[in-house]
Amino acid sequence: GAASAEKRSVEDFRVRVHGGPHPLRAGSEGAATTFGRDDAGWAPRPPDDANASRRIVAHFDVDAFYSQVEELRDPRLRGRPMAVTQKFLIVTANYAARSAGLKKLMSLTKAKALCPEVALVSGEDLTPYRACAKKVRAALERFGTCEKLGLDECWVDLTAEVDRRIAAGGPASDPPLVGHRHSSTHVVESDNAHRPTDIRAVDPGRTNDDAASRGVHAPVPPGRCEDGADPVGMDPVGMDPDVWDPDVADPDMLERRLRVGAAIAAEARDAVRSATGLRMSAGIAHNKMLAKLASGLHKPDDQTTLPASHAAGTVSPLPVRALPCVGRGAERELLDRGVRTAADLRRVTGSKVCEWLGPRVGRRVHDAAWGVDREEVAPKPPPAFVTCEDSFRSCTTWDAVDAVLRVIAPDLVARMDEEYEDEVERTVAAGALIPAGRAARTLTVKWRDVKGGKGTGWSR
């Protein structure tokens, strides 16, 4: 039936992604970078994050979110290739379509040529997706502080629940591992040039020696520099005992805390599926950056833990664009200076990186090159403004302007209503006796004139 067809599609996708020959490439030009043991010369590493030994963070990512929502709305779409579109591009596709070669941001013409039987569903109206995302977050918030990252992704701080279960004792305080445990000896690859943080684990039969023979950087062995020397002042898992919490920093306790976190993450995924019908993947680690990297390693509908002892080695071969705070501008600045990967960045002092990128971004990027992320999980504040925008082939008369506004205005009103209701819920949850909503005070209309294929800038 549809369920078995869907399962076959998922397995076909796993074979396509996890067994494919597409190597992880460093930098925007796509050339592979290899570092041998003769390339030692690390700059001083940043101070360790004192909170990381206790902190357990999970990153949750709904698999093919828009597609799953559409399948819930129309069950006839299950088990057949389907893609959600906006304008003339695919924004996401289910796994049956992905196994046929369809990808994000592919043109509809190419998608139909690759998979003539694909069902195309318009995703212009984001209302149903926002409604499902709200239910997902509500389910996840039962397990810890939740931070929204787009509609389909969230971080959850599991630390308090991990502490509670370990203190209570019993089987829940030391469970077997649920899901996968990633090692820096495992090869990872990227199949999406538009999202460099999306990395996938490949066939476990392939080793770092296989990767090196193909010109792909072999990750740093756990707890060691690339030249084979132990980092100065570090214990066997790469942690400074003078900084880390002695009650939890020993390797056995760190692994135990991750296992407890993985068990909680599995419960959270089950809770989301019960509440919404949506399947999701998760990554569990000691900080936000590593949890996000881990969550995609074994998609779909699976989860992966990334131990602290393998953090630096996992990050080492990644292109700098995969690091937090590195956008196009920062990437170009680093590439112009010959820094293509996290391993390259480790050969530069933190002060020099701050000189290039500014102190705030420089510190975060230098930390990230070593697998360090000090940022705590924190709920997003309510948005300061709500925006609705669209593009049109032609809008050259006042009648056309009126028609455009009649398309945009209803969506804007609906968004304002959602924000009002969300604020009421937030104030009630905070203990307010009289619920308070939010009301807009300013309306701004922006437009952009496009001539000869080039925009002239925004006017308001």
Image: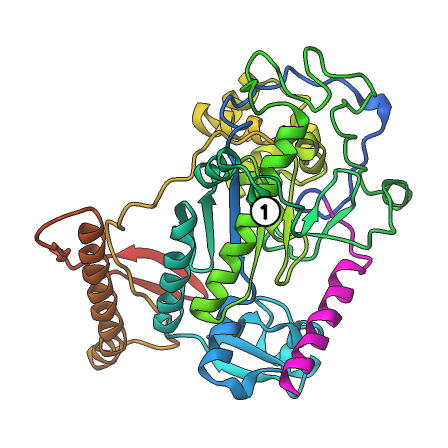
Q: Find numbered disc 1 in the image and state the secondary structure of the residue it sits on.
A: helix
Q: Which residue type carries mark 1? A: Ala
* Rendered view: 124 above or below 427: below
Q: Viewed as shown, does residue 424 lie left or right of 121? A: left
Q: Position of residue 136 (x, y in %)?
A: 42, 61
Is residue 332 shown above or below 431? above
Q: On the rendered image, what quadrant is the C terminus found in?
A: bottom left
Left or right: where 388 falls relative to 112: left
Of 50 and 345, the residue lying toward us: 50
Residue 17 in the magenta stretch? The answer is yes
Residue 358 vs residue 426: left or right? right
Instruction: Please state, as top left, top right, bottom left or bottom right, where the N terminus lies in the image.
Output: bottom right
Compared to residue 362, the image places residue 429 above or below, namely: below
Magenta-highlighted residues: 1-25
Q: Which residue is mark 1?
A: 262
Can you say whether 76 is above or below 374 in the image? Answer: below
Q: Position of residue 278 (x, y in %)?
A: 50, 68
Q: Position of residue 64 (x, y in %)?
A: 55, 67
Residue at 39% x, 66% y: name it.
451
